[in-house]
Amino acid sequence: MDAGQWGACQPACRRYVGWLIAKELIEPVRALPVRERQKWVVAGLALKEGSPAEGALKAKRVRWPDVEARTRRIFGERLLPNWVLLEREEAGH
């Protein structure tokens, strides 16, 4: 429900809807193994306290390949022509 629909809903209705949403969320959690369920609870408590979960702070940095070094390793110090530019010159663009 969006915020505009909450205004027309009675307090009892809001509690019922909140209970349904919580029930839909908790049922799959109950099916998790105990260790995973404990991790889920700890992450939920961290969100309630306003601090980010432990794993959210540790983002792995991506190591991009060094394309220039790889090209030098394959072709050496030779200069290769840019065939795209040569073809554009011949086409008269």
Image (cartoon, grey):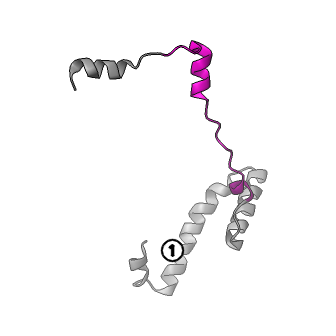
Q: Relative to residue 91, is residue 17 drawn left or right? A: right
Comparing 53 with 89, the one in front is: 89
Q: Relative to residue 32, is residue 83 drawn left or right? A: left
The residue positioned 72% from the left and 68% from the top of the image is 45
The residue positioned 68% from the left and 49% from the top of the image is 59
Q: Is 60 inside the magenta-drawn segment?
A: yes
Q: Relative to residue 83, is residue 30 drawn left or right? A: right
Q: In which quadrant of the rendered view does residue 54 lie?
A: bottom right
- Residue that label 1 marks: 17
Residue 66, horizontal then vertical, whole percent: 61, 29
Please determine whether, in this image, residue 67 is positioned above or below residue 90: below
Residue 34, horizontal then vertical, whole percent: 78, 53
Quadrant including the N terminus: bottom left
Segment tinted magenta in the rendering: 54-79
Residue 30, horizontal then vertical, whole percent: 69, 57
Q: In which quadrant of the rendered view does residue 39 lie?
A: bottom right
Comparing 26 with 45, the one in front is: 45
Q: Is 65 inside the magenta-drawn segment?
A: yes
Q: Relative to residue 68, is residue 9 drawn left or right? A: left
Amino acid at dot 1: Val
Residue 14, horizontal then vertical, whole percent: 50, 80
Please determine whether, in this image, residue 76 is positioned above or below residue 38: above
Badge 1, how many Cα within 10 Å: few under 14, some, many 20+?
some
The residue positioned 25% from the left and 17% from the top of the image is 90
